[in-house]
Image (spheres, rainbow, N blue to C red):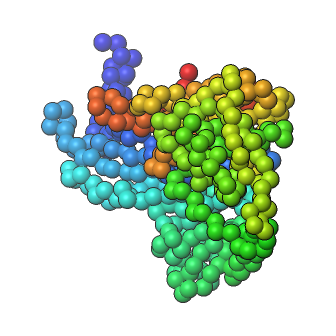
């Protein structure tokens, strides 16, 4: 063997010995688990969609021996990470690990203690260039530019000696109001605002005045029906001055039973036939009426619109700013949420209609229908809609869930999607 070869083999042997002596390791990771709701933040005027995730790592560590006699220990860690996405493309911009929880004192061959399995986190809010995050019932101030840590709980106490030893240990005692709001252990309320992270006594803003009572035209109060539990489908809309409705035949018949105008005023109380209903377009006739000394508008009748499309569990896309169906422009029209199928293979879809109720485009999303346990949430951009939800798959009789971010172009319905579990784009 040449001298150079001998030196190479010796170097490799020394590396192997060092690994064994120092404790070589290998890791496996569970899919990241979303913590709380994503949040749209703004960096230099640009929107950025932030998510907070928790990921479990199982680290197998060599603790002595060699070859077949090598001994191992399993350590468990939980990593909390903030990640920013460009909402227009739902592509990741950066990710930063904020905190790792685990047993740092583990030794020998016994598995480490599992520390952090019950820890949870959430994004609280943005105050200028600071984003506040709550992890394991402790506050973290994070840089909006790259997610790096500006201050943890200990740093917050150093900046504000009046908080020393008084930071609450219960997540319910933290909130957000243009800064981190906290109820200290001595029952004083503080808010931490500004780039200096300075704590001051918290004075809540005066609550807005209560809305005026809903009165009839004769001055007597109305009895307002309660909102139904869960999602309230938006099925009545106004487009360029004319009324449109999305109903099944039974729902339309119930809507037309409107002698006192309550269905027009509170359309959420109209019959909802549920997840398997197929709805079509109707043209409501709205008339003025008078009962005794009460004057009001009511739905007199509904006529089906020939040739208009129908939708499985259809409802109008709601403008987040107004709560009303979102009116589209260039061209004028509306958008409709609906399902593709009634079974587990069904997906959520979005269809844009013009003012003649012609379909401009339909886009199927890699998401299951919204539910109480897996709600679909969305954000509006000038030219796109950004949607986050869950795709439920049944594989070998086992239900599997994956979360996606999806951006849909309002102009042509083109979509881009990112799998938050697999951490890769959807082709």
**Image height of 34 relative to 203, above or below:** above
Q: Look at the image and tell me in which quarter the C terminus lies.
A: top right
Percent position of residue 266, x then y: 66, 56
Q: Residue at x 64, y 46 (%)?
A: 256
Res. 29 image quadrant: top left
Residue found 61% across the figure and 52% down from its top? 268
Q: State the image quarter where residue 384 is shown.
A: top right
The residue sitting at 57% across, 63% down in the picture is: 226
Q: Nearer the viewer, residue 97 or 200?
A: 200
* Front one among 17 and 343: 343
Residue 104 is left or right of residue 47, and the answer is: left
14 vs 297, left or right, is: left
Residue that protrudes farthest toward the front in the picture: 292
* Horizontal side, residue 316 vs residue 21: left or right: right
Instruction: Determine the residue positioned at 38% across, 51% down.
Output: 77
Residue 70 visible from this viewpoint: yes
Q: In the image as oriented, which residue stretches furthest toward the top?
A: 1
x and y percentages locating residue 200 in the rendered image: 70, 79
Q: Position of residue 385 (x, y in %)?
A: 69, 37
Instruction: Give the number of callouts.
Output: 0
Residue closest to the far bottom = 186
Percent position of residue 9, x then y:
33, 22
Q: Quadrant of the N terminus?
A: top left
Q: In this view of the protein, which residue sits in the foreground, 105 or 198?
A: 198
Q: Is residue 415 visible?
A: no
Q: Nearer the viewer, residue 36 or 310?
A: 310
Image quarter of residue 241: top right
């Amino acid at each position: 063997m040449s001298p150079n070869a001998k030196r190479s083999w010796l170097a490799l042997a020394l590396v192997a010995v060092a690994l064994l002596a120092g404790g070589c390791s290998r890791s496996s990771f569970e899919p990241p688990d979303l913590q709380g709701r994503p949040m749209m933040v703004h960096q230099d005027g640009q929107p950025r969609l932030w998510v907070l995730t928790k990921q479990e790592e199982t680290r197998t560590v060599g603790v002595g021996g060699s070859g077949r006699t090598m001994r191992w220990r399993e350590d468990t860690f939980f990593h909390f990470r903030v990640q920013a996405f460009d909402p227009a493309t739902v592509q990741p911009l950066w990710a930063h690990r904020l905190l790792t929880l685990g047993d740092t004192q583990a030794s020998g061959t016994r598995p480490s203690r599992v520390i952090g399995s019950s820890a949870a986190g959430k994004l609280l809010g943005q105050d200028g260039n600071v984003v506040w995050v709550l992890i394991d019932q402790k506050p973290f101030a994070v840089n909006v530019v790259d997610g790096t840590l500006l201050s943890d709980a200990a740093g917050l106490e150093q900046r504000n000696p009046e908080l020393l030893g008084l930071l609450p240990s219960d997540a319910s005692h933290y909130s957000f109001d243009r800064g981190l709001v906290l109820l200290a252990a001595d029952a004083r309320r503080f808010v931490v605002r500004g780039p200096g992270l300075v704590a001051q006594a918290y004075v809540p803003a005066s609550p807005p005045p209560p809305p005026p009572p809903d009165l009839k035209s004769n001055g007597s109060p109305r009895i307002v029906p309660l909102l139904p539990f869960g999602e309230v489908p938006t099925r009545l809309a106004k487009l360029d001055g004319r009324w449109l409705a999305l109903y099944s035949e039974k729902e339309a018949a119930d809507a037309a039973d409107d002698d006192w105008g309550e269905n027009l005023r509170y359309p959420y109380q109209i019959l909802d036939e549920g997840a398997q209903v197929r709805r079509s377009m109707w043209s409501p006739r709205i008339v003025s009426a008078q009962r005794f000394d009460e004057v009001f508008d009511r739905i007199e009748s509904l006529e089906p619109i020939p040739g208009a499309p129908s939708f499985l569990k259809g409802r109008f896309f709601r403008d987040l700013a107004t709560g009303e169906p979102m009116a589209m422009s260039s061209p004028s029209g509306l958008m409709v949420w609906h399902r593709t199928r009634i079974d587990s293979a069904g997906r959520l879809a979005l269809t844009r209609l013009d003012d003649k109720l012609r379909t401009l485009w339909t886009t199927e999303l890699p998401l299951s229908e919204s539910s109480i346990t897996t709600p679909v949430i969305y954000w509006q951009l000038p030219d796109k809609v950004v949607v986050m939800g869950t795709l439920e798959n049944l594989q070998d009789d086992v239900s599997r869930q994956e979360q996606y971010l999806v951006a849909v172009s309002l102009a042509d319905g083109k979509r881009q999607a990112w799998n938050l579990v697999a951490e890769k784009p959807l082709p």
